[in-house]
Image (spheres, rainbow, N blue to C red):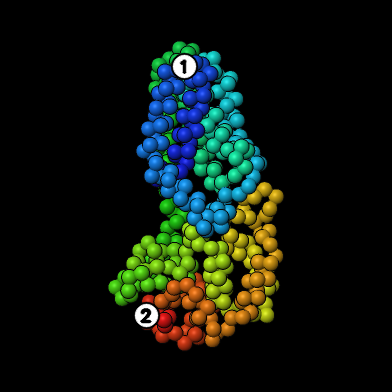
Amino acid sequence: VSFYVYFYTWTYLLAFNAFVFLLALIRKDWDQAKKVMGVSIAAAIVGIPYLTHTLAVSRHPFYAELGPRFGFVSSRVPFISKTMIAAAVLFGATYRYLPSRTKSFFVPLLLTGFFTVNQHLITGRYFRFDNHHHWYYSKPMVMILLTTILFGLIKKFNWRPFISKALAALMILFFFYNGALVQAVSYKAALPEVIEEQRYAELFRWLNESTPKDSAVLSSLSISKFIPAVTHNNTYHHGGALYTFQPTSRYAHIYLVYTYLKGIERDKIEAYLESEREDISSFIFGYTYLVQPGICHICFPDRVIADLAGKYRELNDENFIEFVKKFPVDYIAWDKISDPNWNPGKFKLPEVAKFGEIMVYMVPR
């Protein structure tokens, strides 16, 4: 999990260290301030390669387009967490009963929880996934805080030892049960889809054995997400590609490719696009219009629809493959079940493989 949320790990710890340092200065605890400063400097030295890479990323020519798609938008709307507020109130109410070390740890921790999801109030730059700080760190820390308060009160009021042990045992059992239950429910919900996806195994085996390495495959979206992971091929499109250094115009182009394959009639394209605004917003713009205050998910400029419709009307069966080949493509893999309206054969492409309801066509250079 730390690898998945590494950005949030080090930013959360950085903020926590900053608050510990500030509180040490306020208390004139110079020894602790020096220790925190030393740890932070050492961590910054270790992180120099990562930090320089992050700086280089921000200077990339496509960063200005990538940022909004990833959810970096201008905002100063506060993020209000009822969980954090309730935890802070409870902490304040029991503060006088807690040991000094507990206080010294949880005061900066609570401040960190509020700050990491509201840093945009200062910077003006909101990040769509700032709530990862809340779910992966602040909320678990609140649970630890509540546990600490509970056992602190038990010790303070000299409750019988067996009560403390019984509560500890019950909590351990609960956490293990909850963890196992969440995993079981998740796997059960995903099982039918995973079973259905097994029919792609022959296709992936064929791609690995019968096609050149790094050849590009345009496929049904149900297939495309697996190609980079289980084959030696490249994929023409992947939903995660939105978050790479590519111009937004590329995703508009690919959206038209998939729309044409669906067989939408040219004289009905504008009405179709208007009805698919939510899909267009996600496919082309990612999180750009999903997180901005006062702007709805489908509220991208109307000219986008007009531009897409205009380019779509220029497409026909004779020029479509050349349009597709604006970006590398060597094969088209068609899943008849997930995309019954596709028919790559009408473009006079040679069929090179068939696996049940999955057809593979070669795209000439």
Check whether the beta carbons of the residues at disc 1 and disc 2 lie within 8 A of each other: no
Q: Quadrant of the N terminus?
A: top left
Residue 350 percent location from the top left of the image? 41, 85
Q: Quadrant of the C terminus?
A: bottom left
Q: Which residue is mark 2?
A: 353
Upstream in sequence: badge 1 or badge 2 = 1
Mark 1 or 2: in front is: 1
Marks counted in the figure total 2
Q: Quadrant of residue 265?
A: bottom right
Residue 19 drawn above or below residue 270? above
Residue drawn where x is 57% and y is 24% of the image:
90
Q: Residues within 10 Å of mark 1 (few under 14, many from 20)?
A: few
Q: Nearer the viewer, residue 220 or 10?
A: 10
Q: Nearer the viewer, residue 143 or 315?
A: 315
Residue drawn where x is 67% and y is 54% of the image:
296
Cα separation between marks 1 and 2: 72 Å
Whether residue 222 is visible here, answered yes or no, is no
Residue type at mark 2 is Ala
Q: In the rendered view, does 72 fall on the left or right side of 34?
A: right
Q: Quadrant of residue 37?
A: top left
Residue 227 percent location from the top left of the image? 39, 66
Of helix, strand and loop, which one carries label 2? strand
In the displayed orientation, state which residue is furthest to the left. 209
Of helix, strand and loop, which one carries label 1? loop
Residue 156 percent location from the top left of the image? 47, 13
Residue 160 percent location from the top left of the image? 43, 14
Whether residue 241 is visible here, answered yes or no, is yes
Residue drawn where x is 61% and y is 80% of the image:
314
Q: Which residue is mark 1?
A: 29
Q: Residues within 10 Å of mark 2 (few under 14, many from 20)?
A: some
Residue type at mark 1 is Asp
Residue 137 drawn above or below residue 56? above
